[in-house]
Amino acid sequence: MIRALALALAVAALAALAAPAWAAPLKDPSRAVTDGIICPCSCGEILTGCTCETGKAMKAYVDREVKGGKSKDQVEAALVSQYGEVILGAPKAQGFNLVVWIAPFVVTVAGFLVASLALVRWTRRRSGAAVSAGAAAHGSESPFRTDPDARLAALRARAEEELRGLRE
Amino acid sequence: MSEIGRLAVILAFIASCYAVVSIAWGLRTSMAGPLRSGRRAVWVVCGLTLLATVILVQALTSLDFRWRYVAEHTSRDLPMMYRVSSLWAGQEGSLLLWLLILSSYGAAFLWAYRKRLDPFYDAVAMVVAAVMVFFTGLLTFVSSPFRILATAPADGNGLNPLLQDPGMMIHPPILYTGYVGFIIPFAFGIAVLLMNRTGTRWIEEVRRWTLFNWMFLGTGILMGARWAYIELGWGGYWGWDPVENASLMPWLVGTAFLHSVMVEQRRGMLKTWNVALIVLTFELSIFGTFLTRSGVLTSVHSFTESNIGPWFMGFILISSTIAAALILYRKALLESENRLDAVVSREGSFLFNNVLFVALAFATFLGTVFPVVSEAVTGSKISVSAPFFNRVNVPIALALLLLTGAGPVLSWRRATASVLKRNFLIPAFVGLLAAVIGIPLGLHGVYPVLCVFGVAFVASTIVMEFARGIQARKDVSEARGAMSVVSLVQKNKRRYGGYIVHAGMVVIFVGVLGSTVFQKESHGPLRVGEKLAIGPYALTLRGVEEKQVTNAQQTRAVLDVSRGGKSLGQARPAKAMYFKSQQPMTEIALRQTSAEDLYMILGGVNDDGSVSIQAYINPLVSFIWVGGLIMALGTIIALTDRMRLRREEKLGG
């Protein structure tokens, strides 16, 4: 189960890095660029939604470049060379900035592993306690197998406990 | 009057210090006098803060420009309601509001537990008073709203135009009520550790306080999203702005706590984890306040940049260190039996749900602070914005959505194969069916399809839970139809309140999915008589008009709006030039229906006389706001459960 979880999260991490994720299939190729660019004025907003004069001028520039036949990567590269990487809405997954892309998934996978291990351990502890309680009362066999009264009493106690929980 | 306000804050600082010392002395010596005196001092702080706030509001509404705060945040042309809301438009005023809500929580806490003579509750009050020392200290020594200018200006600077929105009258106070309220669960957690308190009664108290604050914070976040949608004019409602993220983080961790606390109540497990979550929720609330004021990150919400960031960082470091040290010191107190019957159980699902909530909060935190970290390490500036969060947070959020459906229908202790089959088969089938139907309707990509599956899956599990509950009560209840649902909810408000909250969350997911995946956009320059087509709508420019409102000059585009050839009247998106700030602000025009919003923006009037119009069709946005209301309703229902129990306790003697 743990391996399956780790694998599922690794796939999610790769999908996150590779896919454009949530965005709608874009008919407007300019928007594919402006959705990933920050307006160079101090507002810090994504260019698509920015309504300031700087934003409008930059959107017009992107539009011209895309209509002129440049690809998304080419337009982005031109903007990065002019303004620096700060113009990109998300850092490239390289060098130190790889940390921000990887760490959330590492934490998630680690959290799942720890939680899974804890659950397995706590479950074993429970069954170990039941076995030893049975052994103490009836020799080596569990009371639940040999004594129907003991089983009934245990089930009653559990039902009482759960009802108490519901009342609280 | 400013002297009285300043004196009130100074006295509040002294009273806070006195409350801490007096209660600590009373707890140490077990003397009732100092405890009583300390509790009264908390009331005094609340009264003095209220007095200071009233004085400041009076100065703001009467436009007394001798006051620096009034001159900086109001002007003669500012409408009366915004003069009042300018109380929280600047740093000093918003800190005073923080303190007012904080001290009100302190007073409310003392009132709620006035009949409990247990010193444990005094310890809780002491922790609240200690936090009040910090805020009264800031207002006294660092950031006072009661400073007087040497020469009063003829007029003030005015209020930031972005804040001149009716939503600003209620959004910040509601958000603050949520943020600040986490002080009570935090104080309970610290008091438990300080007093070496065993037992689980306190955890039920904390759950209720947390639920109350969580509801306000969630409502405040959605109101902020609504404000951004209307006021910022970019067609969206959530931009993963640092300050938006700051409010989301404590909400996420608080949500994790509200789930894991159930495991502690039922099974006496996860005690350390729960205390850690309480502490983290409070620290993240303070971190959010730090972010809005420190100026370390660029944000459209950072209205109040200043030099008080280090004070907040210091407070976070000190309070979290004390909390961590106490958790370690009282390790034995928090030890649990930690025994489970089976991995596949509700307990197990809550543990994974906690991992995902905390991971989501961590991803949000890391993305928010990473520009600062990266610059410190590499020396070059980067941005971490929506493109990052949409890629990283969306898969985690979708996993959470699926668990939202799975968790409640797994049995406590052990979910057998027959239970799994009975509870999951139909929802999984409905989910798959919805996803299969959705693909030819325009769903593209893994995440939207997964989201549709998750939404249908969770909705089915909720409907099935209600149906089973009604069926089970059929023989004992006479209620039929809609009344049977009401009767069922009344019988177990906590459980079904929780399901209603989940239903609200599902509705929000539908709104987010619809408005993101199916959004349509169109833009272009229009001359009078020309049309802009978007989906079934057509916008025809009829002209441009100028209009003066109270404190701004508006340039409006007059658009005839039609849908499928049928006229829907006129819309007037505008650019407003505020006289004081001389900033052009976007005033959108919005045509809302339950199915979709037509969102219109005036880009500006071009040199050649044409008018730039941008329009969006945002489907299902209304679901987001309705989902928020449903969540709030579910929370209120869950909160009222305690009242029934109290009545039953009283009747039972």
Image (cartoon, coloured by chain):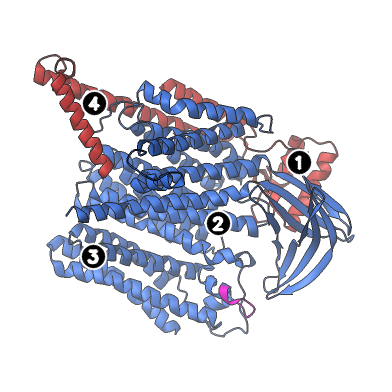
Chain colours: A red, B blue
> Regarding mark 2 in the picture, which secondary structure is present there?
helix
Left or right: where B72 falls relative to B492: right
Q: Is residue A103 visible?
A: no
As rendered, which of A148 and B187 lies closer to the eye?
Answer: A148
Amino acid found under the numbered disc labelled 4: Arg
Amino acid found under the numbered disc labelled 2: Gly
- Cα–Cα gap, marks 3 and 2: 35 Å
Left or right: where B629 falls relative to B189: right
Q: Which residue is mark 1?
A: A78
Q: What segment is highlighted magenta in the picture?
A: B75-81
Decide which of tag 1 and tag 4 comes sooner along the chain: 1
Label 3 chain ID: B
As rendered, which of B376 and B66 lies closer to the eye?
Answer: B66
Main SS, magenta region, reads loop
Rendering quarter of residue B223: bottom right
- Cα–Cα gap, marks 1 and 2: 35 Å
Residues at badges 1 and 3 in contact (C-beta under 8 Å)?
Answer: no
Q: Which residue is mark 3?
A: B114
Rendering quarter of residue B336: top left
Label 2 chain ID: B
Whole-percent x and y of residue A33?
Answer: 73, 41
Q: Which residue is mark 4?
A: A126
> Regarding mark 3 in the picture, which secondary structure is present there?
loop
- Cα–Cα gap, marks 4 and 2: 47 Å
Label 1 chain ID: A
Q: In the rendered image, which quarter contains the C terminus of chain B?
A: bottom left
Q: Is residue B288 visible?
A: yes
Amino acid found under the numbered disc labelled 1: Ala
Q: Are marks 3 and 2 on the same chain?
A: yes
